[in-house]
Amino acid sequence: MRQLIEEIEDWKSQGHRAALATVVKVWGSAPRPLGSKMAIRDDGRMAGSVSGGCVEAAVCQEAESVLDTGEARLVGYGVEDEEAWSLGLSCGGEIEVFIERLD
């Protein structure tokens, strides 16, 4: 977590905006544990991980909206969700990710 905080501070010192995505709920098998975090910069750069690569691109898209509006979002991905299969979350579990802008 310390390395992620340092990365975010560095981004902000360069004038970038950032969002933080946190795994807040896990059901069944999931690639990353509860509390896993990923920071997303306004230009799409990422640090950390919420899914081991499975749904990170989708989380980044959600983060773009959060950065633009300032409104936090709770998004879910799971095996019942067709989008999750296409994104690669085929581990059999479900996750919920809370995305917030860091002001």
Image (cartoon, rainbow, N blue to C red):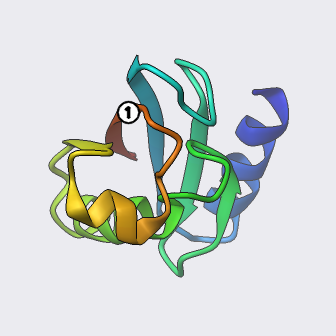
Could you say where residue 67 lies in the image, as x and y percent from the top left? 31, 63
Q: Is residue 49 above or below residue 58?
A: above
Q: Is residue 17 above or below residue 74?
A: below
Q: Which residue is mark 1?
A: 95
Residue nearest the viewer, comparing 22 with 81: 81
Q: Is residue 94 above or below residue 21?
A: above
Examine the image and state in which quarter residue 102 appears.
top left
Q: Is residue 19 above or below residue 65?
A: above
- In the image, 92: left or right of 83? right
Q: Quadrant of the N terminus?
A: top right
- In the image, 67: left or right of 38? left
Q: Secondary structure at mark 1?
A: strand
Could you say where residue 71 lies in the image, as x and y percent from the top left? 15, 49
- In the image, 47: left or right of 28? right
Label 1 crowd bin: few (<14), some (14–19), many (20+), radius 10 Å: many
Could you say where residue 92 lies in the image, as x and y percent from the top left? 45, 36
- In the image, 3: left or right of 57? right
Which amino acid does the dot numbered 1 rest on? Ile
Residue nearest the viewer, comparing 42 with 54: 54
Could you say where residue 72 lies in the image, as x and y percent from the top left? 21, 43
Examine the image and state in which quarter residue 85 appears.
bottom left
Image point 74% across, 40% down: which residue? 4
